[in-house]
Amino acid sequence: MTKKKLARFAEMETFDHVVQASFDEVFQKDFKLKGKWAKEFFRNDNPIILELGCGKGEYSVGLAKQNPNINYLGIDIKGSRMWRGAKTASEEGIKNVGFIRTRIGLINSFFAPEEIAEVWVTFPDPQLKKYYKRLTSTRFLGYYQKLLKNYGIINLKTDSAELYEYTNKVVELNNLEVLVNTNDLYNSGIVDNILSIKTFYEQQFLKQGKPITYIRFKLNNSLQLEEPKEEE
């Protein structure tokens, strides 16, 4: 491990807005803040929004700056990347954003039913060979059903045409309500301050001329989700 990474990991340990739970703390058991994030972590009653696979945390930080009355949590397993967002939040005194270093597959150990208002999935690995690893697969949507408020919102922003098309199939098959849907975001005329936030990876994709896709839909918590047959 490089000295830079070691230094970043050491600094992460000093941030009070970063949670780095050990595997033993969350595997098949509830994390100590489950059901208490607003009251004990953020110390307010504001809604909580998650960014999954947050990378360097640009979206979590950007959203927090624009919406001071909403709490944001960025989640990723890569601590050396997450450090950048955590560092920015610390330097700029942004109090309504935090970060959790963990695997997204363990997310239900962290949050109680209806504790989360909304989920952002920004430029995840599209997992083209293994559909069940995709963050918009019915497997993961099932995880989100256990923590989102009923009819809570899922946002997917991606450069992957395959992941976008797959997500559309899941949404259509399960009759989920679509709020926004475009296969070319920056030529759609719908870009606002939130959608114009660009992650490091998004900037790279735009330089390559890749269109950015975006879909925003509601998730019914009582629905038994079906996987598109061609993916099974």
Image (cartoon, helix red, strand yellow):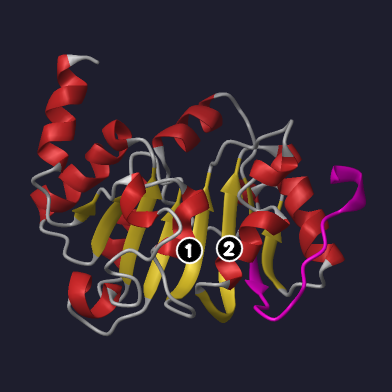
Q: Quadrant of the N terminus?
A: top left
Residue 39 painted magenta? no
Say above or below: 140 vs 145. Answer: above
Residue at horizontal 86 percent and vertical 53 percent from the top: 228
Residue under pointer 1: 108
Q: Give the numbered dot on residue 195.
A: none
Residue 219: % across, % down: 65, 73
The local secondary structure at tag 2 comes to helix
Q: Give the numbered dot on residue 143.
A: 2
Nearest to N terminus: mark 1 or mark 2 = 1
Say above or below: 200 vs 38. Answer: above
Residue at horizontal 33 percent and vertical 39 percent from the top: 56
Q: Quadrant of the C terminus?
A: top right
Residue at the outermost top position? 2
Q: Which residues are magenta?
A: 215-232
Going by the numbered disc 2, the residue's amino acid type is Tyr
Residue at horizontal 52 percent and vertical 50 percent from the top: 105
Residue 202: % across, % down: 49, 37
Going by the numbered disc 1, the residue's amino acid type is Asn
Residue 11: % across, % down: 11, 37
